[in-house]
Image (cartoon, grey):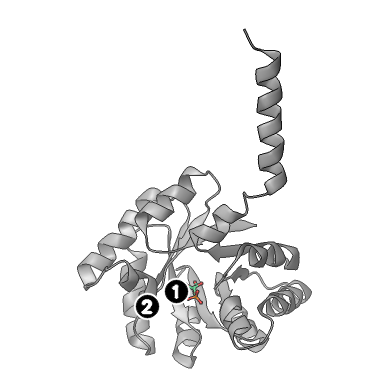
Amino acid sequence: MKFFIDTANLDQIRQAHDLGILDGVTTNPSLMAKEGVTGHDNIMKHYVDICNIVDGDVSAEVIATDFENIIKEAESLAALHKNIVVKVPMITEGVKAIKHLTYKNIKTNCTLVFSAGQAILAAKAGATYVSPFIGRIDDVSYDGVSLIEQIVYIYNLHGFETEVLAASIRHSNHIIKCAEAGADVVTCPLDPILKLLNHPLTDIGLEKFLADYKKGNQG
Ligand code: E4P
């Protein structure tokens, strides 16, 4: 399973990278705005900065919603760096664009996916990744992890090559449940990644090991 960080914050990307477990980055227009990255040139530069930190796939989202402009934007994003994956929304024009970009060998991440039917269309169009937003599904009282299980089942049954990228992760247990469900990738903020480290018995155990070492090695 690959681990992506879902942020445009360079410090947090560096921190996850330094942990040695990071395989890539996902961003979206809201995450870029949260970091105060605005204006075409600054946004492009920020993607390059991210690519210079992490040697792995970096999702950069298009703003256009019509086929022609999605393609134009996608081509200029893909030209920024070899690791850019173009994030395209699950809309009619987006599906057409994914098909076209796949044909042109440009990697895509089909975003804003909330159903198995949408995931089938993304795979048929040849998306590199499909991003079901599990936290947002939980928010409206459905079960996001069940959707991951369903998509993984369908993709395996039919041999679809699109990778299931579990997105909108809210807590560490989401990561574990998505791993169990067979997600190819989880993308999450830094906090749930770091919280995977925590266990009180680890802290108690380490404290005792160090105290016992000290006792045996005094003087
Ligand atoms: C995925 O690629 C999105 O950037 C992200 O996971 C959305 O998460 P949110 O629902 O927490 O905004």
Mark 1 neighbour class, 10 Å CA radius: few under 14, some 14 to 19, many 20 or more? many
- Return the mark for residue 4: none
- Does residue 114 appear to the left or right of 28 in the view shown? right
Height in image: 61 above or below 172? below
Beta carbon of the mark 1 residue lies under 8 A of ligand 1? yes
Q: Amino acid at mark 1?
A: Lys
Residue tagged 2: 62
The residue where tag 1 is placed is 87
Where 62 falls versus 7 (above or below)? below
SS assignment at label 2: loop
Please identify the residue farthest to the bottom as the structure is shown.
92
| Residue 132 at least partly seen | no
SS label for mark 1: strand
Q: Quadrant of residue 69?
A: bottom left
Q: Residue at x 65, y 19 (%)?
A: 214
Residue 219: x and y, percent? 62, 7
Distance between the alpha carbons at the discs numbered 1 and 2: 6 Å
Residue in the picture at 34% in, 84% down? 64
Left or right: 72 in relation to 200: left
Q: Position of residue 141 (x, y in %)?
A: 65, 87
- Report the front residue among 170 and 37: 170
